[in-house]
Amino acid sequence: MNEDRIKGQWKQLAGKLKAKWGKLTDDDLAVLDGNREYLAGRIQERYGIARDEVEKQLNDFDRTL
């Protein structure tokens, strides 16, 4: 996920992130600030899945944008 892309389209992207990963909190999204590593860590923590699976899901998500 390109950080410039994240920052430029934040409101739309935040809605899509919440739709995909509903366990992310508004606070998680507020702190995210385009940081993919932080996002991956939050998803991993909230869903209890392995980091490589999180990266796969993020890559799949990115392709849908």
Image (spheres, rainbow, N blue to C red):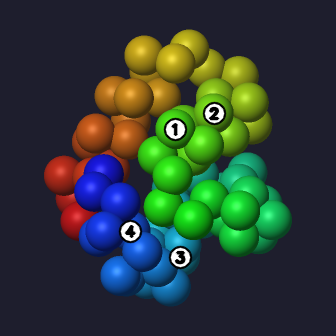
Whichever of callouts 3 and 4 sits on the residue coming sooner in the sequence is 4
Q: Name the residue under label 1.
A: 37
Q: Decide: marks 4, 2 in contact (CB < 8 A)?
A: no
Question: Looking at the picture, does residue 58 appear above or below residue 49?
Answer: below
Q: Mark 3 points at which residue?
A: 15
Query: Distance of mark 3 from mark 2, alpha carbons?
Result: 19 Å
The C terminus - image quarter = bottom left
Q: Residue at x 63, y 33 (%)?
A: 41
Q: Residue at x 61, y 20 (%)?
A: 49
Q: Decide: marks 2, 1 in contact (CB < 8 A)?
A: yes
User: Given the image, on which type of amino acid does mark 2 rest?
Assistant: Gly
Query: Distance of mark 1 from mark 4, alpha carbons?
Result: 13 Å
- Does residue 23 show up? yes
Q: Name the residue under label 4.
A: 6
Q: Mark 2 points at which residue?
A: 41
Whichever of callouts 1 and 4 sits on the residue coming sooner in the sequence is 4
Query: Distance of mark 3 from mark 4, alpha carbons?
Result: 12 Å
Q: Which residue is drawn at 37% across and 82% down?
A: 9
Place of residue 38 in the rendered image (x, y in percent of width and height, measured from the top left): 60, 43
